[in-house]
Amino acid sequence: MPVRTSRTALFGGRIAVVGVGALLGLGLGLGLGLGAAQAPAFTPPAFVAQWGGPGDGPGQFNAPEGVTVGPENRLYVADTNNHRVQVFSPEGEFLFAWGSYCDLETGEGCDSPEGEGQFNTPEGILYNALSGIVYVADSGNHRVQAFSPDGEFLFSWGSAGSAEGQFLNPVGLASDADGNVYVVDVVNHRVQVFDYRGRFLRAWGAKGEGAGEFRFPTDIAIHGRSAYVTDNLNHRVQRFTLDGVYLSEWGTPCTLKTGEGCTDPDGDGPLSEGDGQFRKPFGIAVDPQGRVYVLDQGNHRVQVFTGDGRFLGKWGGLCALYGLDDEIPEGEGCDSPEGEGQFLFPKGIAIAPDGTVYVADSDNHRVQVFR
């Protein structure tokens, strides 16, 4: 299978929608993380490892987007354009994989009418430690599939549409302390919540720019009683209660490449730092200390915040190891031959219990590890 690179002009991810096709590349008791007065100094983690490379062999990737840490600290990767899940040891040793291409709308590639265990551009993945289930956002088939940690198909739910329990390009996944599963329903501009078996519980969000509204949200992270959502085309992060009540937000548009919209860290005047600003933020995760990590994927970096949105630090920068279509030439921006700690439209992030950070460096077709 040839390597397909993402088209990032719109969302910086892939949207697979019927008739559209693939486009997307504290407060006390609220679980808000670190308070403003108590926030310690933050040092970005150091690069420690990477693995991958373009291709469809074991341990290779084609624009991976989702990552999650599973049993025995194994890393599960949604290998998006290879239409599969790959599983690795914490050191990056390939262990096993499952999945193949199936387009439920046309039947192309499907081994059965339901295409159980097959995918069409899977973008999100979640290991729910409470239920012991691995959930995969089978984005192009507009459903969520559930598996054992060994890749055995268990069940699925969802279909194309806008009713309760239906999806249009589901991507981000998260779970709460009760094992409920939160699904970011991108093209329906909402978050839907289900129990661990896929039974619908509630939803929130609508298309717009106001508080609690979204323009193509992409990911969600939960810490305590707060849910953080990356609001991609509104260039912000929004924070909610687990019932979907809006609490706060942070972020404004900033394109580091041109300086458009960017301000200095204090917000006074133009300066191409853009701390706390975003260009199409995609992935999001919370570490054991309650710090919020946001993949500012359009600016090719990771930004870190307190639970109430105060900027703590950042790392990254553009490195196009293999180029990107006709948009970015091969090697552009790389500080070294391997571009360690740099990214090209990173989309997935997961943090292990020991604080190890895994980033799906999507358009460099690799996983990078930081600690």
Image (cartoon, helix red, strand yellow):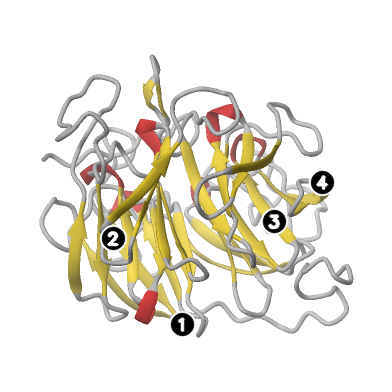
Q: CA distance from mark 4 to mark 1?
A: 32 Å
Residue 26 x/y as whole percent: 86, 69
Mark 1 residue crowding within 10 angstroms, few (<14) / some (14–19) / many (20+): some
Q: Give the number of the disc on residue 371.
A: 1
Provide the residue designation for mark 3. Answer: 227
State the CA–CA distance, disc 2 to disc 4. Answer: 35 Å
Asked whether disc 3 touches disc 2, contact meaning CB atoms under 8 Å apart, the reply is no
Q: Compared to 43, does 124 lie above or below?
A: above
Q: Mark 4, mark 1: which one is toward the viewer?
A: 4
Q: Say which element carries label 3.
A: strand
Q: Secondary structure at mark 2?
A: strand
Cα separation between marks 1 and 3 = 24 Å
The local secondary structure at tag 4 comes to strand
Query: What separation in Å lies between label 4 and label 3 (alpha carbons)?
Result: 10 Å
The residue carrying pointer 2 sits among few (fewer than 14), some (14 to 19) or many (20 or more) residues within 10 Å by Cα, namely: many
Q: Which mark is residue 366?
A: 2
Mark 4 or 1, nearer chain start: 4
Q: Are marks 4 and 1 in contact (CB under 8 Å)?
A: no
Callout 4: few (<14), some (14-19), or many (20+) C-alpha neighbours within 10 Å? some
Of the two numbered discs 2 and 4 on the same chain, state the one appearing first in sequence: 4
Say which of 103 and 21 sits in front. Answer: 103
Q: Indicate left or right for 235 with 351 as reference.
A: right
